[in-house]
Amino acid sequence: MLYRLARPLLFALDPETAHNLALSFSGVAGLFAPRSLACPVRVMGLDFPNPVGLAAGLDKDAAHVAALAALGFGFLELGGVTPRPQPGNPRPRLFRIPEASAIINRYGLNSVGVDAFVSNLSRFSPECIVGVNIGKNKDTPNERAADDYEECLEKLYPHVDYVTLNVSSPNTVGLRDLQSVAFLENLLNRVKQKREQLRQKHGRNIALVLKIAPDLDAAQIRDIAAAVRKAQIDAVAATNTTVSREGVEQLRGANEQGGLSGAPLRARSTQVLRTLAQELKGEIPLIGVGGILSGAEAVEKLDAGASLVQLYSGLIFRGPGLVHECVTEILHAKENRRRAG
């Protein structure tokens, strides 16, 4: 109810201004958000209070962790963060397409840098699982990309439960090339070796997740499945935003450059998820993200092979009550399956 009243005011503002304002008031929203029901699930060796998480991109700087955790998420993925601060692309860089419940962003991995990010994060002790999405700096060549991921991993290691390797944002030139076998196998091996060194140093393990793009063909998905199976990465998140404009072609703002998220992404993202699940045959857990705007669509991701789901654009169009709705629908689906035997 509260968000339905606030949404027209927020949508009257520039999208990035509204984004920042909504984050500032997320603590107030948490006071009125319905408490999510218990729906525990163990994935990647971690115990999640429920399988509904926040996708990366909403809280890029770890500045609103406690407020977001109060909305009922089972886990938060913060960031993306890069080793050195970078401003990202010039504004405007965020665009709504309300008729399609869609968003285009071309932030360009704007980041306060990992040192400031860790300083922000260390002020909070949320009760849910915390992950961080990490990427390379724009001016780091792909041949040295692994250095950036290792640096972020090392500095974040004592503070998080998992890190997600972002090789799929369409807004950093050349970043998606890291999904090719030539780069991906080396990156995964380097990060795995660094994780082992840090595990011994800190006496604890954190999980590694790979986030992939929706704009992949079947052969590319097979190659990625083979690479993550070989490296034994802990999970794969499918998917990031798309460069396709299918479903919004004639709508205002659709010609803006950047990654498209929201309802038009759902089918494409779910198909990649389903294909990946068929390739991996349950060997590696999957996280379903992309176009979830209802509890039924969260269940759809689980049916396609996901163990966890994440929300972002759905929160913009539906508000924080979507978290409770998704958890509730997942619980109902599990209960119906149990009764069916």
Image (tube, rainbow, N blue to C red):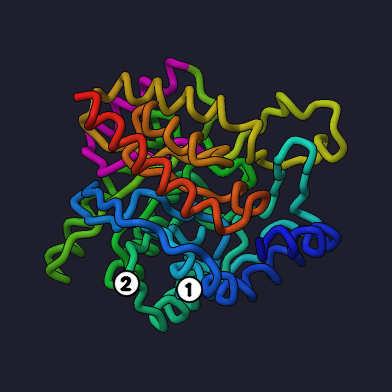
Q: Position of residue 12 (x, y in %)?
A: 85, 60
Please tell me which residue is depicted at 62% across the width and 48% down the height of the picture. 313
What's the magenta region? 218-240
Amino acid carrying mark 2 in the image: His
Q: Is the residue marked by circle 2 packed among few (<14), some (14-19), or many (20+) residues within 10 Å?
A: some
Q: Is residue 330 left or right of residue 296?
A: left
Q: Secondary structure at mark 2?
A: helix
**Quarter occupied by the C terminus:** top left
Comes first in the chain, label 1 or label 2: 1
Camera-side residue of 102 and 194: 102
Give the quadrant of the N terminus.
bottom right
Q: What secondary structure is the stretch in magenta mostly built from?
A: helix
Between the residue at mark 1 and the residue at mark 2, the CA separation in whole angstroms equals 11 Å
Residue 178 visible somewhere in the drawing: no
Q: Is residue 262 magenta?
A: no
Name the element at disc 1: helix
Residue depicted at x 40% and y 36%? 183
Residue type at numbered disc 1: Phe
Q: Is residue 261 left or right of residue 330?
A: right
Q: Which residue is mark 1?
A: 117
Q: Residue at x 51, y 54 (%)?
A: 56
Q: Position of residue 91 (x, y in %)?
A: 79, 59
| Front one among 209 and 310 | 310
Q: Is residue 308 left or right of residue 262?
A: left
The answer to whether residue 282 of the structure is visible from this angle is yes
Is 50 rendered above or below residue 219? below
Q: What residue would you read off at disc 2?
A: 159
